[in-house]
Amino acid sequence: MFSSQFIREVLLRRELVESFDRYPFSLPAVRSLKSIELHPQVTFIIGENGTGKSTLLEAIAVAMGFNPEGGTANFSFSTRASHSELHDHLRISRGIEKPSDGFFLRAESFFNVATEIERMDAEPAFGPPVIDSYGGVSLHEQSHGESFLALVMNRFGGNGIYILDEPEAALSPQRQLTVLARMHDLVAERSQFLIATHSPIMMAYPGAWIYQCTPNGLERIEYRETEHYQVTHDFLANPERVFRQLFGE
């Protein structure tokens, strides 16, 4: 099973890094990184804002050939070049099989992807409109949550590598469960997911590996040991007690 996954391991070529005191190599997720082994199906990267999980995810996506702002490997637009040089210092250890599908989602730049799809469809083409692969309705004419759900339900075709940065950003809890169900179908179709998230719902996917960004780098952690699970569990179990502690009453 491990030999057929699309990404087996990501290694940082530390010998190429001039200094770990400057961005992005100073980020906790990168500074101590040597390698990270990925689960053949679903891997999560979690951590506080600013620890570098999204920067690392972006670098892996770019090293895999995806556009830094998101989309498929065929997207080459650039609204604003803001990605780091980290991808130049990564080596991707791949499996023996190649994916037939793939997508890199950045919640913060999905608007730009939707705009690029409209631009592509405005040009003369022999094939069907690009938007047909996303459900046939302009992503700009839907809410952010609806457009992301349309992406997952219609564009993700299986046997693919899907790299998602905070996919829960515009999704209600029920929609997050819908995405998990779709993920499960895609995993059954030989897909692999790498996801950065804050959502205790998303990271509960059965059997997934969870890496937590700590001051000492990335560390594997069990779901119920994550702060996300513990804080959410304690709050839902007794919100009044949490508020008394929070407000000092």
Image (cartoon, helix red, strand yellow):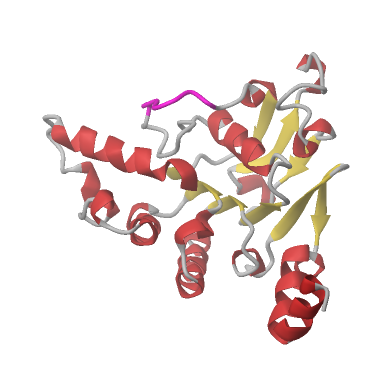
Whether residue 104 is visible here, answered yes or no, is no
Q: Any magenta on residue 77? A: yes
Quadrant containing the C terminus in the rendered view: bottom right
Q: Any magenta on residue 99? A: no
Of residue 171 and residue 136, the one placed in the foreground of this image is 171
* Left or right: 102, with 244 as reference point: left
Give the total of numbered labels.
0
* Residue lying at 78% horizontally and 71% vertically, measured from the top left: 246
- Residue located farthest toward the front when viewing the structure as drawn: 249
Of residue 99 and residue 155, the one placed in the foreground of this image is 155
* Left or right: 224, with 194 as reference point: right
* Residue lying at 75% horizontally and 28% vertically, measured from the top left: 12
| Principal secondary structure, stretch drawn in magenta | loop
Q: Residue 206's image quarter?
A: bottom right
Quadrant containing the N terminus in the rendered view: bottom right
* Residue lying at 66% horizontally and 54% vertically, measured from the top left: 44
Whether residue 110 is visible here, answered yes or no, is yes
Estimate the x, y position of residue 7 in percent, counting from the top left.
Answer: 62, 41
* Residue lying at 37% horizontally and 56% vertically, measured from the top left: 144
Q: Residue 32's image quarter?
A: top right
Estimate the x, y position of residue 71 in percent, counting from the top left.
Answer: 40, 39
* Left or right: 164, with 39 as reference point: left
Estimate the x, y position of residue 100 in percent, counting from the top left.
Answer: 42, 43
Estimate the x, y position of residue 62 in percent, counting from the top left.
Answer: 54, 30
Give the magenta part as a residue range.
76-82
